[in-house]
Image (spheres, grey):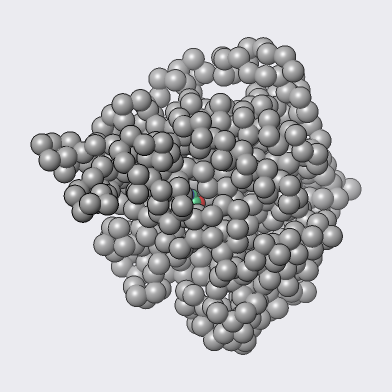
Amino acid sequence: MTTELNPEIGEPTETVTSGSVDPLTLVATGSEWWRSAVIYQIYPRSFADSDGDGLGDLAGITSRLDSLKELGVDAIWLSPFFTSPQHDAGYDVADYCNVDPRFGTLADFDTLLAASHAEGIRVIVDLVPNHTSWDHQWFQDALASPEGSPERERYMFRDGLGENGDTPPNNWESVFGGPMWSRITNPDGTPGQWYLHIFDISQPDLNWENEWVRAQFRDILRFWLDRGVDGFRVDVAHGLIKEDGLPDYTPPAEAGSMGGGAIPLEVEPEKLDDIPTPPYWAQDGVHEIYRDWNAVLSEYDGERVLCAEAWVEPLNKLARWVRSDEMHQAFNFTYLSANWSAEELRLVIDTSIASFATVGAPSTWVLSNHDVIRHATRLSLGPGHLQGDGIGPRDQDRPDPVAGVRRARAASAVMLALPGSAYIYQGEELGLPESIDLPDEARQDPTWFRTHGERYGRDGCRVPIPWEAGAPSYGFGPADAAWLPQPAGWDEYARDSQSGVPGSTLELYKLALVLRGENDLGFGRVEWLDDLGFGSDVLAFTNRGITVIANTGTTPVELPLEGLGELLLSSAPVTEAVLPPDTTVWLRAA
Ligand code: NOJ
């Protein structure tokens, strides 16, 4: 490996070992599976329940693998199933190397892994390094140990301000609402130090300046790599290091709680470091951690992958997370946040591909996950819905379910035609909307509690998915009720209502994935079709001989079908020569 100056980022980076950049077109090249993969996110508690306790589990996932094989995905990413008190649905880990009994056992995990591999499906697990659960033995040891002890040094403990130390060390606000600090009580009953938690009070932040913490995580990576996992989705990969001195900070109102949201798509490379950065997000120190992990993964065969959940903008700054000696992929939340607008999408697509290509990485594409309003709902809402806030009965801005799913299908048909790696969130292949009218007493997201109901949070996108129309819990499991209530009227979304039904959302996804695979679109490149004479509401490009045209506007556009060839796929019915609003088609030249 050699070191050279990266032209875009302007700082030394290792040269690409596997992928590289085509200097003429600025497109990343390389052949690893993750560069083009379609990765399906499983939220285990809401996927399939095998034992009837109303909560999904690992055995449930194994029992439904055939449907994922049929869908045609390359890999699954499992949200956390580790030992946890579940105060943040498992993103509060009490033992990184064991399975929570609610989800099964390590043996169940091994069975799932082997069964997935037998089907040719790779498995990515979720790593949550920014914080542990307060139940983790490390935190319990810290509480039982004196100030300044090695056990305390593993977390972010600080003295409070003021005469009695009863004011938090700074003004930071937790992502879930309320202060980012909580005060402990010493073993002798006196008030003690404060600890930092970017998220819930039950999720104390680890101190990543501490070498002991780093060593533990190398071991955790190896534990799962030895078991045979294909990689890790890394939670809050922009949060591990905090600015020296922990200075006060108030985020701009338009920024989402995870960061991002207020910055242009890209910034001149030399000005990247001038962008105001919250003292707890996107600090430079995170990168040496990922270089270290990259080295751990390199010890293993089989192209293991690290994918960053980093809400970092602009895109050319996010590219730092996927330099060739760091992570391999980063979720493209700029794409997720883009409006359904041809002009905006084109800009984001171009900027994404170019930004990641400067470091030899592919772009990823994602429209939904367990933290955001499902895109079948979101795409019919107005502006102003910040990440993580969700939507609920009191919101004035009600979605239009028909327009929402129509746009979602059209948007997914664009996403699945793009080169790079695409993420699908369980249920989106069914056109599943957000569940908006959850009763208050059913809500479980800490955001709801910490903001006293002011922000609904993310429960609405986490409702267990429907498998069978008319069955108890829509076939999610043998129990009548699931951990979050499923709305009436979901029969139409159930997998068995859609399977084999021409025109269903499920069949649309299946067809898109077959065509994507057959034509190797994940390894292709986008070439814009400007000479077809469409207006600014139409997105038109080719990728490996497939022409993709999406009408994001409100009026039909004429489709010169004759010149464009055979219609392969359409997200909504098209008549011969007209592309209706909110519709995407794929065509192949005859
Ligand atoms: C991001 C995860 O996606 C989210 O669900 C979780 O609440 C936070 N990180 C904290 O781990």
Q: Is residue 77 left or right of residue 138?
A: right
Q: Residue furthest right?
A: 590
Q: Is residue 142 above or below residue 58?
A: above
Q: Is residue 121 above or below residue 346?
A: below
- Residue 221, by quadrant, is top right
Q: Position of residue 200 (x, y in %)?
A: 36, 53
Q: Between residues 491 and 108, which one lies in front from this camera angle? A: 108
Q: Is residue 422 visible?
A: no
Q: Position of residue 168 (x, y in %)?
A: 22, 41
Q: Position of residue 447 (x, y in %)?
A: 36, 58
Q: Can you say which quadrant of the picture contains the N terminus?
A: top right
Q: Position of residue 140 (x, y in %)?
A: 40, 52
Query: In the image, what residue occupies the spot 33% across and 34% down?
Result: 148
Q: Is residue 145 visible?
A: yes
Q: Is residue 297 left or right of residue 461?
A: right
Q: Is residue 294 above or below residue 174?
A: above
Query: In the image, what residue occupies the spot 16% across and 43% down?
Result: 166
Q: How many marks?
A: 0
- Residue 451, by quadrant, is bottom left
Q: Between residues 367 and 400, which one lies in front from this camera angle? A: 367
Q: Is residue 491 above or below residue 567?
A: below
Q: Between residues 321 and 203, which one lies in front from this camera angle? A: 203
Query: In the image, what residue occupies the spot 67% across and 19% down?
Result: 14
